[in-house]
Every structure is written in C-alpha cells, then in structure tokens.
Amino acid sequence: MATELRELVSDQVITTIAEGFQFTEGPVWHPDGYLLFSDIPADTIYRYAPGSDPEPYLTPSGNSNGLTFDGQGRLVACEHGGRRVSRTGPDGSMDTVADRFDGKRLNSPNDIVVHSSGAIFFTDPPYGIDPDPGEQGFNGVFRLDTDGSLELLNRDMDRPNGLALALDESILYVDDSRNRHVLAYPLNADLGVGEPSVILDMNVEAQGGPDGMKLDSEGNLYVTGPGGLWVATPEGQHLGTIEFPQLPANLCFGGPDYRTIFVTARTGLYSIEVSVAGRAVF
C-alpha cells in the first residue's frame, strides 16, 4: 500500500494535449487505443488518438458529460441536454436507456459507471438544467438494471456527481460536490446500498469540489477536486494533490499499459504518467 504520493506519481510532469475547448468532461479510454471526451457546451464528443489532434467524434452529443463503455464496448453517455442516459446502437445512433423516473423527466445525468453484471449506476444532479428545479424534486443516485428498470438508491445528497466502484464491487463511491466529500456506500448482493460513510473529506480552502473519480488497480482513489487531482489510499488517506494548468473536472486511465491519466480541465485536455495502472473499462 502506498504511503506517499511519489510512490504512485513519481514525476509530476503535466503534458498539455490540447486547449481551446469550451468545457471538457467525461474522458474514457477505448482499448483500441483512443480517448473519447465530452465538450459539454459544444455539444460534441471528441476522439483523441495519441500522436494526432483531437477531432470531433459525435455531434450533436446531447451535451454529454460522463462517458463510459458497457461490457459489449458500446458507448454509454450521460446527457445534460437530452436529460437522459443513452447508449450507441449498431448504426451509431444514441438510443435512450433511461430518461424518466416515476414518470418524471430526469434532471441532467452527470456521471456513470457500469457494474460487471451489466447494471449501470449514474448520478442525476441539476447542473445541466440549473436554475430550472426540474421535475424530480431531488438529486438522485440511480441504478439502471439490465431489464430496463430504474432504481433510486439515494435522494438525500445535495449534489451527487462523480462515482466509481471498488475493485471487488463491494462499495459504490459517490462525490457530493456541494458538501465537498466522497461517500462510500456498501453494496449488498442485490446491488442496493447501505448506510454511507465519508471516506474523503475535501473541505479545504482551495477552489473546487469533488467531481470526477477513478480507482487504480490497487484501489487508490483519484478524485478531481479543490486545487487539482487528489490522490488517496483505499482507506481515504490523502496522499497529495496534483496541480494542473486549469482546475480539473474529470479523469480516466488509459494508454497501452493504463499508466497514463488523462484529465479534462475546463478548456483543456492534459495527461500525466503514473506508476500503478488503472483498470480497463471493458
């Protein structure tokens, strides 16, 4: 287990890949060797292959935010504009898999992670519709089951945002951006959640709140938050914060050995090399 940041990130050299976007988010690495990421206001998903410039991949994107792939390699997106979770079909179209709960429209799905069972966990804060209060009356954490049913897991968080699963899928980690902490929810056998605990308190003086989150192959947490990219042990010990040219919003592991972290930060896309690999999404 790492006890110091340098054991995980020995050389904090930031590479600027590209700048000049409007607001970047939701990076995800495809094992075929390319990165997809959202530019929310531009209504575009970009594709970046190392050695080339980012280029539009999908426009319009429904003002997508969080992106991931399911077990079949299909792109799954949280759409602010579409107020839905969508998945690419065989013809490349973005098909709705969830847009309503209890007969009411979702707020603006934000971030997403896929369980090995095929179930999809996502957060639904109001960022994409603010100041519209929305129809739900709360900001939820949801589970979308493989049969298409949508289950509400939590309605009490102020601003649920980034989320991730523990390596053994026994814990669902969820950021509460406004309260500036990361919660750990135990997952039971039917993928319901137990009472959460605060695993990482990020209430410091620096600008920003917890946003995107990923785990490496040793279970260490990487959370974009106040002042930069926070790195913490599986127990929640804060090892240090990596600063970027702009305040990071989200991240993912990628590259041929998954030892590159790609960071979306406001108008830019950046990367940094790490010592411990992340996990492939599928």
Image (spheres, grey):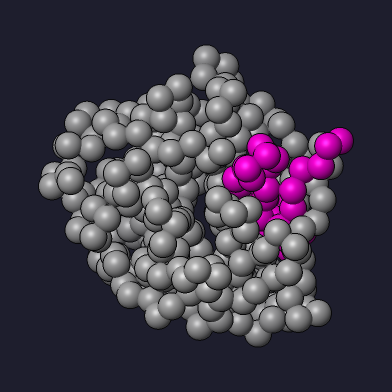
Q: Can I make out residue 90 in this image?
A: yes
Q: Nearer the viewer, residue 113 or 203?
A: 113
Q: Is residue 109 above or below residue 11?
A: below
Image location (x, y in percent) of residue 203: 28, 69
Query: Which image quarter: residue 170?
Result: bottom left
Q: Residue 282 appears in which quarter of the rendering?
A: top right
* Image side of residue 35 versus residue 92, left or right: left
Q: Is residue 280 above or below residue 98?
A: above
Marker count (numbered)? 0
Task: Residue 138: say if magenta.
Answer: no
Farthest residue, direction top: 51
Q: Residue farthest to the left? A: 3
Q: Nearer the viewer, residue 224 or 129?
A: 224
Tell whether 278 sits left or right of 75: left
Residues drawn in magenta: 63-91
Residue at x 20% of width, y 58% of height: 237
Q: Residue at x 60, y 45 (%)?
A: 68
The x and y percentages for residue 249 are 46, 50
Q: Where residue 225 sits in the image (x, y, percent)? A: 36, 56
Q: Position of residue 64 (x, y in %)?
A: 67, 50
The one nearer the camera, 3 or 157, is: 3
Asked if residue 90 lies in the magenta stretch, the reply is yes
Q: Identify the residue at horizontal 57%, vertical 16% (top origin).
A: 52
| Up-down relation of residue 108 to residue 21 (above or below) | below
